Amino acid sequence: MEAPKKTAYSNDGYIVDQARLTDVRYGLFTSNINGCGWIAEFNFLRAQGQTVNEQALADDLIRYTLFRGLTGTDLFRLKRAIRRHGYPTKLFFRWNQKARLPEETRAGVIYYCHKDGFHFVTFSRLEAVEPPVDAAGEKRFRFFNGIAGKSNHYDTLRGFLAKHNIIPFALILAWPGKKEDPASENPAASD
């Protein structure tokens, strides 16, 4: 019997293995090299139930990057891109060992440094996470594209950072679960 073909996607459609995503270009390179920013945006929007086209999303985000994505995506451009879809996020600086987020946080994106360099990972509580809290009472999230190919990666924010972040802090975009009208960013757009 033939082994199932490994893919970049989880069974429920999230991108969980960036190294296998070689068919979507992100600027000068393919997404397996520098696409974690648009992949984080894709997974974030998918967690909100939105259907998005991978290449269209990558092409839209690359317009706002420096050097056509040669150095990947910066956090502030990613924050702005997510807001354009109607999801305002708050930026938090957190030490790994003390990493907690406001109680109302439903989803977000972590910008941290793993063994191969800086990386974006989406996390979400929008689906049932069992158990919802760990033994210490900290909320658990589902993480996407944090461990290559692992589609059901559940952990606390502190647990994830302590295991995977090689520097002592991370920057986090946290979404409290309230969607805004995308046109509200530009009042003139409603005319």
Image (cartoon, rainbow, N blue to C red):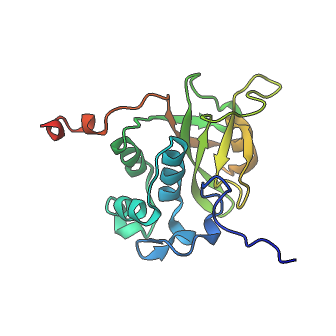
Residue projecting furthest to the left: 191
| Number of numbered discs visible in the structure rendering | 0
Q: Residue at 56% of width from left, 24% of height from top? A: 102
Vertical order, 179 against 166 (above or below):
above
Point out the residue furthest to the right here.
1
Task: Give the percent coordinates (x, y) of residue 94.
Answer: 59, 35
Asked if residue 8 is positioned above or below residue 136 in the image, the reply reads below
Say which quarter of the image contains residue 179: top left
Q: Nearer the viewer, residue 94 or 150?
A: 150
Q: Could you tell me which residue is drawn at 46 percent across and 46 percent down? A: 50
Residue 136 at x, y percent in the picture: 80, 24
Q: With 132 as the anchor, is 85 left or right in this view?
A: left
Q: Nearer the viewer, residue 112 or 42?
A: 42
Left or right of 71, for residue 120: right
- Indicate the quadrant where residue 19 lies: bottom right
Left or right, residue 134 beside residue 124: right
Q: Position of residue 167 (x, y in %)?
A: 65, 49
Q: Position of residue 158 (x, y in %)?
A: 70, 36
The N terminus lies in which quarter of the figure?
Answer: bottom right
Q: Is residue 26 above or below residue 134?
A: below
**Extreme front residue here?**
1
Q: Residue at x 72, y 70 (%)?
A: 6
Q: Quadrant of residue 161?
A: top right
Residue shown at 67% from the left, 53% from the top: 146
Q: Quadrant of the C terminus?
A: top left
Foreground pick, 169 / 176: 176
Looking at the picture, tell me which residue is in the foreground, 121 or 92.
121
